[in-house]
Structure formats: C-alpha cells, structure tokens
Amino acid sequence: MRIAIDAMGGDNAPGIVIDGAVDAARDNGFEIVLVGDKDAIEKELARHRPYPANIKVHHASETIEMHESPAISIRKKKDSSINVMVHLAKENQVDAIVSAGNTGAVVCAATLGMRTIEGVERPGIAVVIPTLKEPTLLIDVGANIDAKPKHLLQYGIMGHVYSKYILGKKNPRIGLLNIGEEESKGTEFVKETYKLLEQSPLNFIGNSEGRDIFTGKCDVTLCDGFIGNVVLKVSESLA
C-alpha cells in the first residue's frame, strides 16, 4: 500500500507530521510519500537519519493555509500539497491520502479532482469511532451543515461501502441518529430521511440515539454535519 501524506498540513507542520510518518514507516511495511516543499521535508527528515527506505518525497511548491477559502485556494494553488496528493491518487500512484491541514480544501480537492461515487452528490466526512464491540463509522462530521434528506441517504451509501470493504462488515447495519428510536420522533428533516432510508436497499435498522454510537449497535451512524461535528468534538474532549 502507498499512502501520500500532506507534509505541510496541520499545526507544527512539517516537523510533527514527518515525525509521525517516520514512526509509521518504521512500524509498517507500506510506502509513505511525503508531499510538500522538498527542501523543508528533507531538512526535517535529516533529524531521523537513517530514515526508512519506504519513505519517498514528492515536491509541491504551494501550501494551502488553514485560514484560506477552500474553493478559492484549490483553484488558485494548483501545485499545493493537497492538490498534488489528489492528483497522485487519481493517477493510481498512491492508494490513500492523509492530511491534517485545511479540511474544506481536502474535501473540495477530492470532489473536484476525483469526483464522487455514482449516486452521491455531496461527500461527507466520516470518522471511525471505537465502541464496546467493534469500530463504528459516523458520517457526516462536518462537510455539510445544511444537508438534505437525500444527502444522508447518500452518506448511507458511502458508509456502507467503507464499512463493507475497509472494516470488513458483510452487511453493514445503518442507523439514523435521532432523539429516540421511534419512527415518529425527530424533526421533519429526520423523518423524511428515515423514509428514504427505509425504502433503500441498505440494511437500515432504524433510529439510534446518541448513546448507541458507543455501544456498537450500528456499523454506520448517519447525521448532518452540524450534529456530527458536535458529537465528534464532545467525544474528543472525553477521550
């Protein structure tokens, strides 16, 4: 497996990013491609000599900062580390990309550069959450705060695919985050989403409550980006 890492993304980059990449390369057999300013990357790698042979460097002359507009910066900075990573993935030169940088820019670049799978209009951000049983997927945690019911159905499709092929679940159980298990509970948005999921070929098991995320009741839990981001940040504060 070949993984591209945005060496310029996130707080204290590139130093802290490269520290983690070197540790990962030493502990695993996959190839890591560090994308970003070559001189800056090699300067940091020098601290780890001899660094693992499975680390490669791919130069990108530009960096998208955290405060920049995702849509504008992706179009203006064609040679940004984020754009370059997406291009490498599109050309099958890497199997996955990782960035701790501008989240919106990553979503925008991936959507414009690689498009979405059939039937999905808007991408959602998913996180794998540990539970009392097996890891579960929560989607969306911040890509779209104004999602429509059809978008949550599409998140269900994305979640099904990830859970099946990455997490190894044969027929992933899909749940809809709500204030109660009853079909009649929730806002009109949630009720309409429930109907769409119920009519879909997905293995939809109904509504799930906040506590169910951590019990492993569902393999995939669906919500809009506003709610999902709140759940994620609260979970992080308790970790």
Image (cartoon, rainbow, N blue to C red):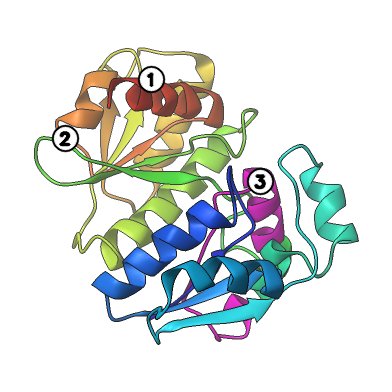
Q: Where is residue 103 in the image (x, y as percent from the top left)?
A: 62, 45
| Circle nearer the N terminus (1, 2) | 2
Whether residue 147 sits left or right of residue 238 in the image: it is: right
As helix, strand or loop, the secondary structure at mark 3 comes to loop
Q: Which mark is residue 187?
A: none
Mark-to-mark CA distance, 3 and 2: 32 Å
Badge 3 vs badge 1, beta-carbon distance below 8 Å: no
Instruction: Tell me, yes or no, if residue 117 can be seen here.
Output: no
| Circle nearer the N terminus (3, 1) | 3
Mark-to-mark CA distance, 3 and 1: 21 Å
Whether residue 50 sits left or right of residue 121 in the image: it is: left
Location of residue 123 with respect to 175 vertically, above or below = below
Give the mark toward the camera: 3 or 2.
Answer: 3
| Circle nearer the N terminus (3, 2) | 3
Q: Position of residue 147 (x, y in %)?
A: 61, 33
Give the mark toward the camera: 1 or 2.
Answer: 1
Name the residue rendered at 36%, 27% in the picture.
Answer: 236
The magenta span reads 88-111
Badge 2 crowding class, 10 Å Cα cut-off, few under 14, some 14 to 19, many 20 or more, is many
Residue 110: in magenta span: yes
Mark-to-mark CA distance, 1 and 2: 20 Å
Where is mark 1, residue-wise?
234
* Quadrant housing the C terminus: top left
Badge 3 crowding class, 10 Å Cα cut-off, few under 14, some 14 to 19, many 20 or more, is some
Q: Residue 217 carries which label?
A: 2
